[in-house]
Amino acid sequence: MAITVGKEAVDFTLPNQQGEQVTLSDFRGKHVVLYFYPKDMTPGCTTEACDFRDQYKSFADVNAVIIGISPDPIEKHQKFIDKHALPFMLLADEEHKVAEQYGVWKLKKNFGKEYYGIERSTFIIDKDGIVQKEYRKVRVKGHVEDALMFIREQLA
Protein backbone atom coordinates (compact mmCIF):
# COMPACT_ATOMS: atom_id res chain seq x y z
CA MET A 1 0.00 0.00 0.00
CA ALA A 2 1.38 3.39 -0.92
CA ILE A 3 0.94 6.57 1.03
CA THR A 4 -0.07 9.40 -1.26
CA VAL A 5 -0.01 13.11 -0.59
CA GLY A 6 -3.57 14.40 -0.88
CA LYS A 7 -5.10 11.09 0.21
CA GLU A 8 -6.33 9.94 3.60
CA ALA A 9 -3.60 8.61 5.91
CA VAL A 10 -3.71 4.89 6.61
CA ASP A 11 -5.31 4.44 10.02
CA PHE A 12 -3.68 2.15 12.57
CA THR A 13 -3.59 1.29 16.25
CA LEU A 14 -0.32 0.65 18.12
CA PRO A 15 0.72 0.60 21.79
CA ASN A 16 2.46 3.65 23.22
CA GLN A 17 5.30 3.62 25.76
CA GLN A 18 2.80 2.92 28.57
CA GLY A 19 1.11 0.05 26.73
CA GLU A 20 -2.01 2.10 25.92
CA GLN A 21 -3.52 1.53 22.47
CA VAL A 22 -3.29 4.66 20.31
CA THR A 23 -5.25 5.06 17.07
CA LEU A 24 -4.21 7.64 14.48
CA SER A 25 -7.77 8.70 13.65
CA ASP A 26 -8.29 9.70 17.32
CA PHE A 27 -6.22 12.80 16.52
CA ARG A 28 -8.67 14.22 13.95
CA GLY A 29 -8.99 17.93 14.56
CA LYS A 30 -5.23 18.27 15.07
CA HIS A 31 -2.35 18.16 12.64
CA VAL A 32 -0.14 15.10 13.15
CA VAL A 33 3.60 14.89 12.64
CA LEU A 34 4.07 11.15 12.24
CA TYR A 35 7.73 10.29 12.20
CA PHE A 36 9.29 6.88 11.71
CA TYR A 37 12.78 6.31 13.04
CA PRO A 38 15.05 3.24 13.17
CA LYS A 39 15.99 2.74 16.82
CA ASP A 40 15.84 4.29 20.29
CA MET A 41 19.08 5.50 21.89
CA THR A 42 21.09 5.72 18.65
CA PRO A 43 22.83 9.01 17.78
CA GLY A 44 20.69 10.10 14.79
CA CYS A 45 17.42 9.03 16.39
CA THR A 46 18.31 10.75 19.67
CA THR A 47 19.15 13.97 17.83
CA GLU A 48 15.88 13.85 15.90
CA ALA A 49 13.81 13.12 19.02
CA CYS A 50 15.51 15.91 20.96
CA ASP A 51 14.96 18.34 18.06
CA PHE A 52 11.24 17.49 18.16
CA ARG A 53 11.31 17.88 21.96
CA ASP A 54 12.93 21.30 21.69
CA GLN A 55 10.26 22.47 19.21
CA TYR A 56 7.37 20.74 21.00
CA LYS A 57 5.71 23.98 22.14
CA SER A 58 6.01 25.49 18.65
CA PHE A 59 4.22 22.45 17.19
CA ALA A 60 1.54 22.66 19.88
CA ASP A 61 1.08 26.35 19.03
CA VAL A 62 0.05 25.34 15.47
CA ASN A 63 -2.32 22.61 16.71
CA ALA A 64 0.08 19.77 15.87
CA VAL A 65 0.90 16.61 17.80
CA ILE A 66 4.13 14.67 17.37
CA ILE A 67 4.08 10.87 17.26
CA GLY A 68 7.21 8.77 16.83
CA ILE A 69 7.16 5.15 15.64
CA SER A 70 9.92 2.55 15.66
CA PRO A 71 10.11 -1.25 15.93
CA ASP A 72 11.44 -0.98 19.50
CA PRO A 73 9.33 -2.44 22.36
CA ILE A 74 7.36 -0.19 24.71
CA GLU A 75 9.86 -0.68 27.56
CA LYS A 76 12.69 0.69 25.45
CA HIS A 77 10.51 3.63 24.36
CA GLN A 78 9.82 4.50 28.01
CA LYS A 79 13.55 4.49 28.82
CA PHE A 80 14.21 6.71 25.77
CA ILE A 81 11.47 9.14 26.85
CA ASP A 82 12.73 9.22 30.45
CA LYS A 83 16.38 9.70 29.49
CA HIS A 84 15.70 12.61 27.12
CA ALA A 85 12.55 14.13 28.70
CA LEU A 86 10.52 13.61 25.52
CA PRO A 87 7.06 15.22 25.88
CA PHE A 88 5.41 13.21 23.07
CA MET A 89 4.42 9.59 22.66
CA LEU A 90 6.39 6.87 20.96
CA LEU A 91 4.55 3.92 19.45
CA ALA A 92 5.90 0.37 19.24
CA ASP A 93 5.60 -1.22 15.78
CA GLU A 94 7.47 -4.42 16.70
CA GLU A 95 5.98 -6.39 13.80
CA HIS A 96 6.67 -3.40 11.47
CA LYS A 97 3.15 -3.68 9.99
CA VAL A 98 2.53 0.09 10.09
CA ALA A 99 6.02 0.78 8.74
CA GLU A 100 5.20 -1.51 5.82
CA GLN A 101 1.83 0.21 5.26
CA TYR A 102 3.60 3.56 5.09
CA GLY A 103 6.33 2.20 2.81
CA VAL A 104 9.20 2.92 5.21
CA TRP A 105 10.28 -0.70 5.94
CA LYS A 106 13.15 -1.03 3.48
CA LEU A 107 16.10 -3.18 2.59
CA LYS A 108 19.13 -1.32 3.92
CA LYS A 109 22.84 -1.79 3.48
CA ASN A 110 25.42 -0.99 6.10
CA PHE A 111 29.07 -2.03 6.05
CA GLY A 112 28.34 -4.59 3.35
CA LYS A 113 25.47 -6.20 5.24
CA GLU A 114 21.87 -6.17 4.05
CA TYR A 115 18.96 -6.08 6.46
CA TYR A 116 15.45 -4.69 6.73
CA GLY A 117 14.74 -1.65 8.82
CA ILE A 118 13.04 1.73 9.02
CA GLU A 119 13.94 4.37 6.46
CA ARG A 120 13.75 7.60 8.47
CA SER A 121 10.58 9.30 7.22
CA THR A 122 8.02 11.87 8.36
CA PHE A 123 4.42 12.41 7.28
CA ILE A 124 2.47 15.60 7.95
CA ILE A 125 -1.22 14.76 8.29
CA ASP A 126 -3.77 17.56 8.48
CA LYS A 127 -6.64 17.87 10.93
CA ASP A 128 -8.95 16.02 8.50
CA GLY A 129 -6.62 13.00 8.28
CA ILE A 130 -5.20 13.83 4.85
CA VAL A 131 -1.47 13.39 4.15
CA GLN A 132 -0.22 16.85 3.19
CA LYS A 133 3.53 16.25 3.05
CA GLU A 134 5.95 13.34 3.12
CA TYR A 135 9.64 13.44 3.85
CA ARG A 136 11.54 10.31 2.81
CA LYS A 137 15.16 9.42 3.54
CA VAL A 138 15.23 12.20 6.12
CA ARG A 139 18.49 13.88 7.05
CA VAL A 140 18.14 14.88 10.69
CA LYS A 141 19.84 18.28 10.56
CA GLY A 142 17.20 20.94 9.94
CA HIS A 143 14.38 18.44 9.41
CA VAL A 144 12.26 19.39 12.41
CA GLU A 145 12.42 23.07 11.47
CA ASP A 146 11.38 22.21 7.89
CA ALA A 147 8.37 20.24 9.15
CA LEU A 148 7.33 23.06 11.48
CA MET A 149 7.70 25.65 8.72
CA PHE A 150 5.54 23.55 6.39
CA ILE A 151 2.74 23.39 8.96
CA ARG A 152 2.98 27.11 9.71
CA GLU A 153 2.95 28.11 6.04
CA GLN A 154 0.59 25.52 4.57
CA LEU A 155 -1.76 24.34 7.31
CA ALA A 156 -1.95 26.89 10.14
Image (tube, grey):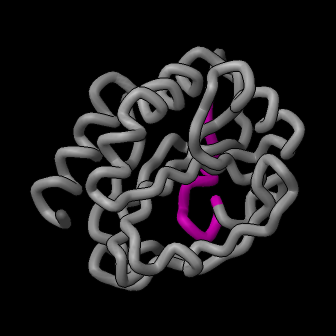
Q: Position of residue 69 (x, y in %)?
A: 64, 50
**Magenta stretch encompasses residue 105:** yes
Q: Position of residue 26 (x, y in %)?
A: 58, 78
Residue 118 horizontal side relative to residue 150, left or right:
right
Q: Quadrant of residue 8?
A: bottom left
Residue 13 horizontal side relative to residue 137, left or right:
right
Q: Position of residue 53 (x, y in %)?
A: 48, 32
As drawn, 102 above or below 87 = below
Which residue is at a point 53% across and 31% down the rendered structure image? 49
Residues in magenta, as a range: 99-109
Position of the N terminus by quadrant: bottom right
Which residue is at a point 50% across and 49% down the rendered structure image? 35
Pick the residue in front: 25 or 58. 58
As drawn, 73 above or below 79 = below
As drawn, 148 above or below 33 = above
Residue 144 horizontal side relative to residue 38, left or right:
left
Which residue is at a point 18% across and 45% down the rendered structure image? 149
**Magenta stretch encompasses residue 131:** no
Pick the residue in front: 70 or 107. 70
Position of the C terminus by quadrant: bottom left
Which residue is at a point 51% across and 73% down the rendered structure image? 27
Residue 142 horizontal side relative to residue 125, left or right:
left
